[in-house]
Amino acid sequence: MYKEILAYTSGHSVTLVAVSKTKPAEDIMKLYQSGQRIFGENKVQEMVSKYEVLPNDIQWHQIGHLQKNKVKYIAPFVAMIHAVDSFELLEVINKEAVKNSRTIDVLLQFHIATEETKFGLNKDEAVQLLTVLEKEPLPNVRICGVMGMASFTEDTNLIRSEFRSLNEIFTSLKNQFFVENPFFKEISMGMSGDYKIAIEEGSTMVRIGSAIFGGR
Ligand SMILES: *Cc1c(COP(=O)(O)O)cnc(C)c1O
């Protein structure tokens, strides 16, 4: 499936994050040999263990909820953190980025699904966070866009409307806070079951696991 998915995403100029959580390093290495360089993990310890044994030019994306006390383990190497949903977490990422003399790319995670359990901001909370950030800049984090997960459902109309709402949030924040900022450009949405809908609704980055690596 990888080749087909890659053809589809690159045909739409969408970045493919291969979600390798729970899969062994050998599986990642096989995909690496096909040219894939961006991999997504949701557990810090697992990402660190794989980082240590796999090639240096892999770009590791933290896609899951991130606890503040674990930022330090990935700060030296992580390429992008997708799931930022508080100013406090941003402050910790900034502090750890400074220690490592780096700037870390992050996305703001939004709650767009109907399920209760998913993490993420709503639009008002994001406006509040970005307003605070204007007064207290965190120079070593770079906010590159937004991320969200649609409801886990067969209802494609619902999924589509959730992705559309994330796109609208992106556009509105872009206009209010990032007009002159070329880095704020990513909409990370779409997984194995819904990435084609996500791309139709303006996704720039999809996070695909099981359709590439098989079930978990
Ligand atoms: C696991 C995971 C994915 C990939 O899910 P698949 O359905 O296997 O493609 C994408 N995003 C996040 C945040 C995940 O935790």
Image: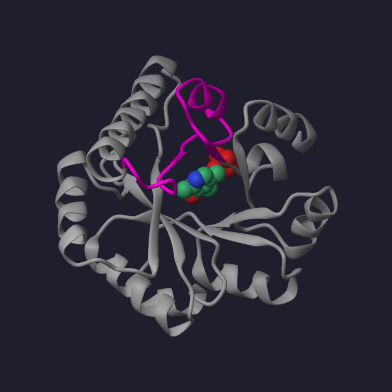
In the image, 126: left or right of 141? left
In the image, 17: left or right of 141? right
* Quadrant housing residue 195: top right
In the image, 85: left or right of 41? left
Q: Is residue 141 located in the magenta-colored stretch of the structure?
A: no
> x and y percent of residue 76 in the render?
53, 77
* Residue sticking out furthest to the bottom: 99
At 15% across and 63% down in the image, what residue appears?
135
At 31% across and 40% down in the image, what residue appears?
179
Number of marks in the image? 0
Examine the residues drawn in magenta and state their main secondary structure. Answer: loop
Question: Compared with residue 169, is residue 87 higher up or lower down, i.e. above or below?
Answer: below
> x and y percent of residue 78 in the render?
54, 67
At 50% across and 22% down in the image, what residue appears?
197
The magenta stretch is 179-206
Question: Compared with residue 46, is residue 59 higher up or lower down, i.e. above or below?
Answer: above
